[in-house]
Amino acid sequence: MSQKVPSGFSAYLRRGAQLLSNPNGLKRLVVQAAKKLNGSGSEKIKAVGEQLGLLIDLLKAYIAGDYRDISTQAIASVAGAVIYFVVPLDGVPDFLFGWGFIDDAAVISYVIAQLSTELESFKQWRDASPNTPTPAIEQPSAAIQLPSETQQQDNDPKSDND
């Protein structure tokens, strides 16, 4: 089943692919996403919270090198979806009460649907490895910042160097 790519998500896919070569940026992304997910009171995000948690767990295992049985394109899509969730000013700004997380939920659902086979393989690996807990990620020393157009940082998961 092929769904239409959510509007604006292509830029986040490119950012996700760029971030794969930056383990520290990936770590900061995971910490920020987990913090935002745990602090979100939005019913829209709670509805996809388990799916988002799966994406975050996959990124954690990928960062730690514990799980690499996933294509580069798929892990870039996962990173792109998590970046989209973390960025407050995406398709629908997160500060718009009641509406701001609808697009985030749509992107997360899209990625889950597109990668269902690979995500199912990850869940089976994770569930079969009870002695391999999802690795902890240290709290970053600095939050991920949105770069201005003239000032982009190499380790920023949201920088788009196109």
Image: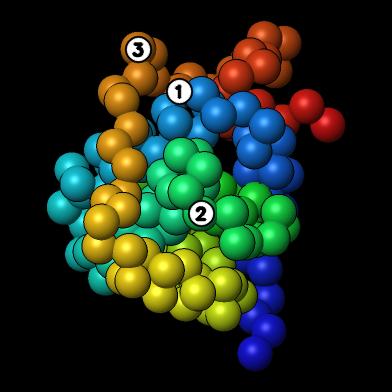
Examine the rendered structure and indicate whether residue 32 appears above or below residue 73: above
Q: Quadrant of residue 94?
A: top left
Examine the rendered structure and indicate whether residue 105 appears above or below residue 27: below
Identify residue for label 2.
67
Which label sits on residue 84? none
The furthest residue to the bottom: 1
Specify whether residue 9 is in view: no
Residue situated in front as seen by the camera: 116 or 162: 116
* Mark in front: 1 vs 2: 2
Measured from the top left, where is residue 118 in percent x and y?
57, 72
* Mark in front: 1 vs 3: 3
Measured from the top left, where is residue 58 in percent x and y?
45, 55
Q: Residue at x 55, y 29 (%)?
A: 23
Which label sits on residue 141? 3
Task: Give whichever of discs 1 and 2 has the lower sequence position.
Answer: 2
Mark 2 residue element: loop
Measured from the top left, where is residue 157 in percent x and y?
58, 30
Q: Residues within 10 Å of mark 3 (few under 14, many from 20)?
A: few
In whole angstroms, how far apart are the C-alphas of marks 2 and 3? Answer: 25 Å
Q: Residue at x 52, y 63 (%)?
A: 107
For the C terminus, the image quarter is top right
Mark 3 residue element: loop
